[in-house]
Image: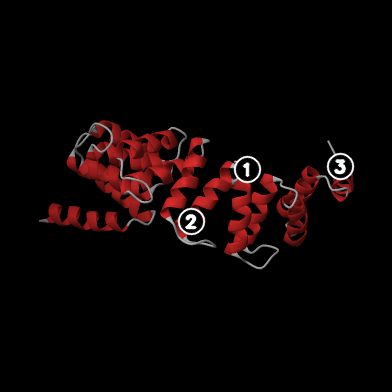
Amino acid sequence: MISGKEMEKLAKTGDPNAQFELGKVYELVLQDYKNAVKWYTRAAEQGHAVAQLFLGGLYYDGNGVRQSYEESAKWFRLSAEQGQMNAQFLLGEAYYFGEGVSQSYEEAAKWFLLSAEQGDDSAQVNIGFMYSNGDGVPKDDDEAAKWFRLSADQGNRQAQNALGYSYTEGTGVPQDFKEAARLFRLAAEQGDANAMFNLGELYQKGRGVPQSNKKALEWYELAVEHGSDNAAEAILELTEDKNG
């Protein structure tokens, strides 16, 4: 394994891989962000795609440099154009929220799709929502469910919840409350408040699971603990019905 001194010597000769690795040491080990920026920049200017990604991240957070969404998006784009999956996702986010670029759902969808096709689970769930809502792409429930499933199969809790909701509504998939409950449970066990609420609803209504106000209340209470306002209202309704 190369030593720190050897790495720095190699970096100073202009080797972009050594420059990137040295930048990582400064950022992740020493937390010396200014030197991280210095070495990432040298590697990024030579076209090192991952250095461009990391440099974009430092500009996004304002670590070691003056915070700039414009600079962040610039470096994400250079990396994304080389096919870097994470950069494609982050450039999609930049377009979705209009950070450093003009807001555009069409451009966001383009970059999310490129990243999703490479297997990024966050990009997959995002492009799924865009197909579900018709943002930047034609509304297509089948495509939405497809991308939710690919992301959910990787353990993405947001996608598990979204696919579960697709099964409750029968949008893009056949209606199946048992499958919805299974997916909501997977997401809920990862701490997803929306899934906790949705699973509580299934218990309250007896859909896909045995009807149980007790279990519904347990899931609603967990959802409230994780920040769900909907669950707080559901608890009030459930207790009012019980008392009434």
Q: Nearer the viewer, mark 3 or mark 1?
A: 1
Mark 2 touching mark 1, by CB under 8 A? no
Residue in the image at 65% along x and 58% along y: 58
CA separation, marks 2 and 3? 40 Å
Which of the 4 image quarters holds residue 206?
A: top left
Q: Dividing the image into 4 quarters, which one contains the C terminus?
A: bottom left
Image location (x, y in percent) of residue 237:
18, 56
Q: Report whether 210 appears left or right of 20.
A: left
Quadrant of the snapshot with the N terminus: top right
Task: Bin the neighbour count of mark 1 within 10 Å (Cα to Cα): few under 14, some 14-19, many 20 and up.
Answer: some
Give coordinates of residue 198: x percent, y percent: 28, 45
Tell me: 60 left or right of 186: right
User: Dots 3 and 1: beta carbons under 8 Å?
Assistant: no
Q: Which residue is mark 2?
A: 95
Q: Which residue is mark 3?
A: 3
Give the residue number, with chain letter if any, for mark 1: 82
Q: Secondary structure at mark 1?
A: loop
Is 120 on the left-hand or right-hand side of 42? left
Residue occupying the far left of the picture: 244
Tell me the mark number nearer the camera, choosing from 2 and 3.
Answer: 2
| 10 Å crowding of disc 2: few (<14), some (14-19), many (20+) | many
Q: What numbered label is drawn on residue 231?
A: none
Q: Nearer the viewer, residue 217 or 149?
A: 149
Secondary structure beneath dot 2 equals helix
Q: Earlier in the sequence, mark 2 or mark 3?
A: 3
Above or below: residue 1 compared with residue 67: above
